[in-house]
Structures are given as C-alpha cells and as structure tokens.
Image: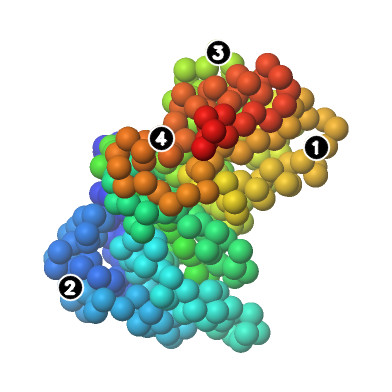
Amino acid sequence: MPAMRVRQAIATAIADEMRTDPTVIVFGEDIAAAEGPFKTTEGLLEEFGPIRVRDTPISEMAFTGAAVGAATMGLKPVIEIMFMEFLGVALDQLVTEGAKMRYLSNGKLSVPMVVRASVGGGLGFGGQHSQTLENWVAATPGLKVLSPSDAQSAYSLLRAAIQDPDPVMFLEPRVTYAERGEVDTNLKMEIGKARVVKPGKDLTIVALGQMTNIAREAAAASSLDIEVIDLCTIVPWDKKTVFESVKKTGRLVVVEEQPQSGGWGSEIVAAVSAEFFGELKSPPIRITCPNVPVPYNGGLEARFLPNATEVNYLIDQLMATGKAPQPWWIREGF
C-alpha cells in the first residue's frame, strides 16, 4: 500500500471520485491554481481542467449557495472552507437550505454536496483560526458530520462523503495534514461507522480527529488495557460500537478537542449513562479544552489542548477514586 500524507490522501480521494464520476466538481478559494492553501487539492486543476476545478471569489456565502444550487441540479460539488470559522458567513446556505432541501421538497430534491473545512489547534493560528466548531453543524437535522484522524480515514471517509446523496460536513484536523500513513485505496469506510483502533477490556476511550492519536498515545503509555474508538462520524454516531465497548469495559472516557460546554462528547456520555446506568463501574467523563479562546502562544496552546499525559492522569484518578476527576484548569486554580 502507498504511504501518503493526509493532505495527499484527501487530494487522491477527490481525484479518484472525479475520475469515476464526471458530475463531481470542486471549487473554493485558492483551490485551483494554488492547489489549496494546505495543498489538499494538489494536481486537480492540471488533470481535470478549469471547468471542474474552479477558484472562487472570497465569499463563502456565495460559493456555498452555488454548491447547493449545483447539487440540486445533478452535480456533486466538493467545496473547501479554508478555516472552519469562515463557515459562519455561509451557515444559512448549509443548514437552512442544503440540509433541509430533501425534507422541504418531500424527497424530490437532494443535495449531494461535501463541505470540507480545516479545523483545530496545534499550529499557532490563534483564537480565530484554531477552533473545531463541530457544535455549529452537529445539531442540524439533514446534515452528516465526519472527521478523519489519519491518511486512511481521510481517503476512505471522503470518498464515502462524496458518494452520499445528502450534504456532508467534512472536518479535517489541519495538524494532521503533514502526517504520513499507509492508504489502501480499495478500503471502504461507512458513514456512521466507528473504528476500534485498539481493543481493550479495562476502559473505553472515544475520540475524534487529532484526539484519536492522543488517545492512542495515552493507551500505549498506560498500564491499563484500554480500548480506543475513533468515532469518525459525529452525525450519525455509531451507538452500536460504543455501546458494545462500554458494555465490555464498564467505563467511558471521551476525549475531544472542544470547549467543555457544548461538545459532541456530551451526546455520547448522555446516551451511555442512560443505557448503562447501574452497570457502569465509574462515571463517564469528558476530557476537553477549557471554555476560553484557543491561545496563540505556543506553550499556552499546547497546555490548552488535551495531551496523553493529562488523559492518563485523569484516567488514573478515575480508576483510583471511582469519581469524576477535576480538569487541569480547576486543579490549578484558573
């Protein structure tokens, strides 16, 4: 299997879909001539030409609306939002128009579009360009929400997203773009299906995006036999895989790159608590970021994000006391 960087896996997935399906088109800011600000559309303009790969003006509202219109007319647009925060000016087109079109048309119209956005911290982009903001889109009926964690999931999940008949939000942790991994281009992944990336029997960690790699690192360093689940899809999330794991381990820890308030992990914890109340060996906990903007300073940003050391400390406290431990900013008096 070839080894690819995550950004190359994304470009390859788009190219493979464009070769297979002539209705797939790509547009966004600087994605054609410049091959994307993070080189995630490298080579597409050269191979497919300016009709199918187009640069747009700096207007997310305009090109997101154009994608909704193109999708309802039979094309499959893949658009790129350079930073997730820029989606704010186009949310109406995505959540009010695109996500509701099938419902409002009584099933007569579908919107097979993919909105790709780079997300997350770790690269020093500051408080306005380092958020994940899953909660902007996760509570929108009619919209699927995915996030890969490595080259393989970036490739396979993106192909699944492009093939889906309804709008998909594809959140790409930009800190992983340069990471390399083997990619089996024949491997298919399903929307709504999580991956058990490490089996275990003592405790379940559910993670997403770059936090999956943090969870793997924590599990490798722990004396416990920890099962790590890469959620892959936030909406619809894989209850079956998570429930089967928690039923086996009796313990749940969710690791998310999201402020403590309003994170996707709250949904997981609530569902597990309702399903297994009385059977759990300890309370389910969430390991998150504090409720403050992402710091620009490198040292502060590193402290802000969950890391393997903090994950293992909190897990050890949970195992020792049977109670939910306090996050670092409470322990340290912030």
**Percent of width and height locating residue 329:** 52, 35
First along the sequence among labels 4 and 3 = 3
- Measure how far apart labels 3 and 2 are at the Cα level: 54 Å
Q: Which residue is mark 4?
A: 303
The residue at the point 69 percent across, 35 percent down is 284
First along the sequence among labels 2 and 4 = 2
Q: Which residue is mark 2?
A: 49
**Percent of width and height locating residue 75:** 39, 78
**Percent of width and height locating residue 34:** 15, 64
Q: Which residue is mark 1?
A: 276
- Work out whether residue 302 can be spotted: yes
Label 3 with label 1: CB-CB less than 8 Å: no
The residue at the point 51 percent across, 44 percent down is 290
Foreground label between 1 and 4: 4
Q: Judging from the image, what secondary structure is the residue with disc 4 in?
A: helix
- Above or below: residue 221 compared with residue 184: above
Q: Which residue is mark 3?
A: 223
Foreground label between 1 and 2: 1
- Above or below: residue 223 compared with residue 49: above
